[in-house]
Image (cartoon, coloured by chain):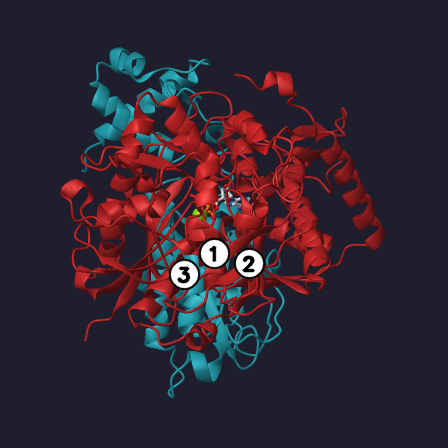
Amino acid sequence: MPGTVQSIERAAAVLRLLAAAPDGLGVADLGNALGLAKTTVHGILRTLHQVGFVEQDHSGAHYHLSDAFGRLGESYLDPNELRSRAINWADSLASRSGEVVRVGRLVEGKVEVVHHVFRPDDSDQDLDVGTTLPPHATALGKAVLAYDTSARPRSLEAYTTRTITDPVQLGEELATVRSRGWATEFEEHTVELASIAAPIRGLGGLVVGAVGLAGRIERICDSRLRHRGDLVTMVRATADAIARDLRDDT
Amino acid sequence: MAEQYVAAVDQGTNSSRCILFDRRGRLVSVAQREHRQLFPRPGWVEHDAEEIWRNVARVVPAAIRQIGAAPSQVVAIGITNQRETSLLWDRRTGQPIGHAVVWQDTRTDRLVTELAGDEGADRFADLCGLPLTTYFSAPRIKWMLDHTPGLRQRAERGEVLFGTMETWLIWNFTGGPNGQARHVTDVTNASRTMLMNIETLDWDDKLLEAFDVPRAILPEIRPSSGVFATATEVLPGVRIGAALGDQQAALFGQTCFSAGEAKCTYGTGSFLLLHTGQEIVRSKHGMLTTVAYQIGDQPASYALEGSMAVTGSLVQWFRDGLGMIHTAAEIETLARTVEDNGGAYIVPAFSGLFAPHWRSEARGVIAGLTGYITKGHLARAVLEATGFQTLEVVDAMNADSGIALTALKVDGGMTANNLLMQFIADLLDVRVVRPMVTETVSLGAAYAAGLAVGYWPDLEGLRSNWHRAGQWMPHMDPARRATEYANWQAAVQRTFNWIRPEDQDL
Ligand SMILES: Nc1ncnc2c1ncn2[C@@H]1O[C@H](COP(=O)(O)OP(=O)(O)OP(=O)(O)O)[C@@H](O)[C@H]1O
Ligand SMILES: [Mg+2]
């Protein structure tokens, strides 16, 4: 049987003490209370700060529980923050691939478009940030749905004859997404279009959204109608770059 | 052969970044470090120049490491920087003499009023294209020389060097106090000092005399794009191919290479620049005349500039000063909790008002405050302040150029804010267009450096890299636009004459 994780026990103790101290506590207070070295406490606090469970007061001397700690069920990453972090990398993906790029996240069973980069051909296109897409019929959707632990969408609406409408088949598809780490779609939402997406993992591996590209079949797929490997690599590298940005500092 | 890149070093007000670009002008990696903002007294803003150099020396290798490249894959360094921020240092030891005094600093407000005297703030505008305000370097240099005992004598003996940030960085990239270092600036940065003659592009004796600045401390002025030196530190052997002020770099990065092309960069402050070709246009409506760039030995290009001092920094104040949000981007979420500004307007005259008013004595107001106003309304008012300031500048620019802007090219960190971009499109009643690279400041520095070393052949090639990444179309009711603008203008009036002459002798 695996043992328990000491640093989590200590973090839990820090959280209990902070929860009981409305005015907040300093590193020394916590160290004394728990019999831990200052550097240990400091590391725990920094991590808790990074994941958004504790906050520092203006002077930086005192820590207290963040109000987000009481609302853990809600999304922890602001969608506008996700866009700010993704923008450089999404642009780069669009200009490398020559395709439309979107960043999305799951909201109440739908994929909300958080960021949209035009196909770089200077043709007329409209921003669709804020609109929603069906998760079972898009690569962007599958890439977030595969890691979602709440209930699967029950009624799977058909958009084309290729849309996956059978929950069992969707379950298998999502298992494939998990094992490969990326998602695809082929004419499942719109005829003649295909898409590729990868999940964006925040701290602790939590999937906070996905980034993907979409375009005409002949550009997204090879002659055997398989999604092009070079595009898959680009999409995954983009998701990793955004994730690195998110983890670096929050 | 291994892929080659150009490294842009963007030494900004809040952070220093290194960004690598490939031959198609695509961003490949970014490393960034913030430095401390020092506020020793109200109105004073300083930076520690050694901290900045340390940060630059760290972010450059970090950006290269990020993609597993070798330093030899970098063909050139392009430097771009916060403008007007001024530093003096000891030529022999390389030690800064005090902190760098930042462009937002207002300690020279009394000095500036004295210098303006009866002739008014525009007394040097013919020579340098700029009004006398606390914004530019020359009053700041005079202040530093006057307020440090013995410094003026040392400066006259040639023991002291002056530089804006690009000068400090190039001096350090080329060895610093080892005796071989290059003490150079470029025409765009020099055009912000008030010491350079805008026509001859050389230091002007009349201006040096007026500000009491010894010529011995000044760097050599060079074209913006052209090899400045070969680095001996950080990236030994790599050529420094360009230096430009950040706003001029953004104009270049947006490929506004022809007269009539304009862009607005939304960062800490926001700056709208209109390329005027090789013609020096004098504004009658509060725009600055500035050098846009100079490529090698070609004639310089000029620009009209509308500078807004406080835009992104108002969002930062809302976050850090008021603690209303945790991250800058969250302001959009908060602003969307309400339908409109509820009648509230924030005029962020933190260091006076810049373009088109140029009122050093103005200070900020929140107007239209009632019990109805929530933090959501204030969040809207914060964002809208950037929109209204843009409209004022665009109006003034249109009046100067005689041609109405038909679309606005934008870039910078605030362009990630869709609510703001839509508001700007609505207010200006024109399309707002974002290019594929929002880090256009860095892209411009990379372009200028890459041109200098032959990585890119010409401007036309660069133009073809520009693509539209996003666009916001106007659809605000004209009557509403007129009312909102009138309200804003009424709020602006209320910021004037806040600092009275007798308050100024601190
Ligand atoms: N989503 C957003 N909404 C509103 N403001 C934002 C958003 N993201 C960033 N900002 C603001 O934009 C500014 C950062 O943008 P950017 O990095 O382009 O600035 P900058 O002027 O280049 O920085 P520096 O001063 O270091 O040069 C900050 O002032 C921040 O408050
Ligand atoms: Mg900047």
Q: Are marks 2 and 1 in contact (CB under 8 Å)?
A: yes
Q: Name the side, left or right, on which B64 lies relative to B458.
A: left
For label 3, the residue is B443
The residue under label 1 is which amino acid type? Gln
Q: Residue at x 57, y 31 (%)?
A: B351
Observer-nearest of A89 and B45: B45
User: What element does badge 3 sit on?
Assistant: helix
Observer-nearest of B146 and B45: B146
For label 2, the residue is B303
Q: How many marks?
A: 3
The residue under label 2 is which amino acid type? Ala
- The tint chain B carries is red
Observer-nearest of A124 and B46: B46
Give the CA separation, mark 2 to mark 1. 9 Å
Q: Name the side, left or right, on which A240 lies relative to B266.
A: left
Mark 2, mark 1: which one is toward the viewer? 2
Give the CA separation, mark 3 to mark 1. 11 Å
Mark 2, mark 3: which one is toward the viewer? 2
**Does A128 sit above or below residue B305?**
below
Q: Residues within 10 Å of mark 2 (few under 14, many from 20)?
A: many
Where is residue B96? Give x, y as percent: 28, 32
Taking the view exactly as shown, the residue that stands out farthest to the left is B178
Residue A112, quarter of the rendered image: bottom right
Q: Do tags 2 and 1 sit on the same chain?
A: yes
For label 1, the residue is B248
Q: Residue at x 77, y 25 (%)?
A: B370
Q: Residues within 10 Å of mark 1 (few under 14, many from 20)?
A: many
Quarter in which the C terminus of chain A is drawn = top left
Q: Are marks 3 and 1 in contact (CB under 8 Å)?
A: no
Mark 1 chain: B
- The tint chain A carries is cyan
Q: Residues within 10 Å of mark 3 (few under 14, many from 20)?
A: many
